[in-house]
Image (cartoon, grey):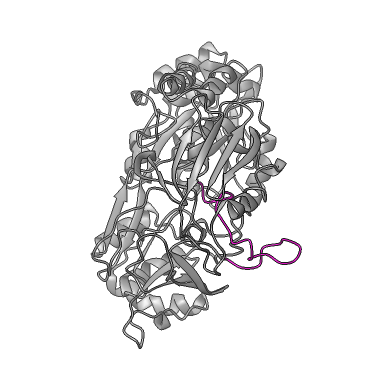
Amino acid sequence: MTTFSRRSLLAGSAALGATLGLNLSTLPALAEDGSMTLRLPLIRASGNLDPQRYVGIFAVQDMVFDPLVHYGPGGQIEPGLAETWEVAPDDTGITFHLRPGVTFTDGEVWDATSMVWNLERWLPKEDYRWMQIANNYKDIEVIDPMTVALHFTKPTPTALTELSYVRPVRFLSPKAVDAEGIYSAPVGTGPWMVEKDGPAGTDLVPNPGYWGTRPAIDRVSLVVIPDGLSRISSIMSGEIDAAGGKFIAPVSPQDATTLKANGVTVVTETGTDTMILGFNPRNDLFRDAHMREAFNLLIDREGIARVVMKGYAKATMNLYPEVIAHAGTRFDVPARDVERAKALLEEAGWIGEGTRSKDGKPLNVELVISEDAVPGSRALGEVLQAGFLEAGIGLKLRNVDHAARHGDIPQFKYDLSLFVTNGAPYDPYNTIGLMFLSTIAPGTDGKIYEDTALDPLILAALAASEADRPAAFQAVFDWLHANWAIAPLFHGDRIWAHGDRIKSFAIPATEYEMPLKSLSL
């Protein structure tokens, strides 16, 4: 076992920086004019920040581009570029009253014209039909220069939540494109402006004309530090101020344990997503509910949360954590029951000593793991491997990279795979709509489960009125649970760590934004 001390990590930070081509000591903290800079890492460069493309770092796009409405804590929808709105009684339309006096940072006016220009860049196009507002889109009605109505072909109760997403729904200046209409610069109405951007990082400064509360920090310097150990040493040495966020600069449970042991402040909050062991629904082996139940009963969820996740997770049998709206009643986490699992396997015809067999075929299955796509999946896979072996199931781990996983999983080239639900602000709608509904083609993340018997329940939940929504979602969860359709494992904590320069800190509502609203130095 390797033991890290504060001294050894600090001593190694210069070498790690040199190895990665970083000069962390040059990151500004106090500028010559006395202004204060917040220094944060990114796992990769910000990239193309066009809000209608799926390329840039979410959190940087969120700093620059405003939405019509914001997703607040607990899923509360809050005003953004729309001050107020009215939803049609049958959920087939929303009328937005736009915030007056707002301009893009290039001087372009925010009004109905700029709103419609942005929406027409993506809303009618086929590529965006994964959202209900695009799939059900009918037309846009300009009522007056500051009032716009969106109309849908059928009830779309997901609309306000979807309009809070970072992309593709954020708003770009109509002047920030070239003569062919192609994005050319990150110009928004948000609280921050990009001052400098490149492969090594991005610097942002406050928008002096921002319509809302001006940032209390003078500058945010985002430096690319792709290596987790380098981020740990940089926090401990004071070269960066904080790190965290699954899509920003993740802090793993192992990292958090090391940082906390060395006196660094670690802040956690219940995560909004769920780690799930998924059965290939097109594999004959897992069409048998007895088999799915047996595999579920061989999992030590409490042990995984405690040991593999270092206590930074909560064991579960639910599709969604309680922090997600309409997450349903809590199902009991079953105790690991090897004898019951063995009995179920024998009922299904899998018998024998050692690795079980049926009709001369051994009970060997394959779990696809990918450290790129699902960090920590190897350690988790090894724990599952040992647990299944105890009941006579051979589990092979097939490690693939991010690209290979996104090729194999949608084509159902696996027996078992690890899936992560979409989390806030996308759930409760997106995971069941995209990763369970059999009538929707598998996306890059594949299908956690599919069954035509489940489809009507999902469609009813997606179309339910506000009053009917809790019961409609509960019906989906009850079906999944009764049929042992999936094997939920845990809700992982959201983890951030910060140094002593930060005096107030709160984890934001989603993994797609920086913790800047309440942060001070």
In this rendering, is residue 106 above or below 268? below
Residue 214 rendering spot, x and y as whole percentages: 36, 65
In this rendering, is residue 243 above or below 194? above
Outermost residue toward the bottom?
32
The picture quadrant where one finds residue 39 is bottom left
- Residue ID at (66%, 30%): 440
Q: Is residue 400 left or right of residue 88?
A: right
Outermost residue toward the top?
347
- Frontmost residue, 421 versus 6: 421
- Residue ID at (33%, 57%): 256
- Frontmost residue, 352 versus 27: 27
- Residue ID at (75%, 66%): 179
Q: In the image, is residue 351 part of the stretch drawn in magenta?
A: no
Give the extent of the magenta segment: 164-186
Q: Is residue 507 left or right of residue 462?
A: left
Residue 360 rendering spot, x and y as whole percentages: 66, 20
Residue 24 rendering spot, x and y as whole percentages: 42, 78
In this rendering, is residue 25 above or below 424? below
- Frontmost residue, 278 versus 89: 89
Main SS, magenta region, reads loop
Residue 366 visible in the current orientation: no
Q: In the image, is residue 171 part of the stretch drawn in magenta?
A: yes
- Frontmost residue, 95 versus 280: 95
- Residue ID at (36%, 55%): 254
In this rendering, is residue 409 above or below 179? above
The picture quadrant where one finds residue 380 is top left
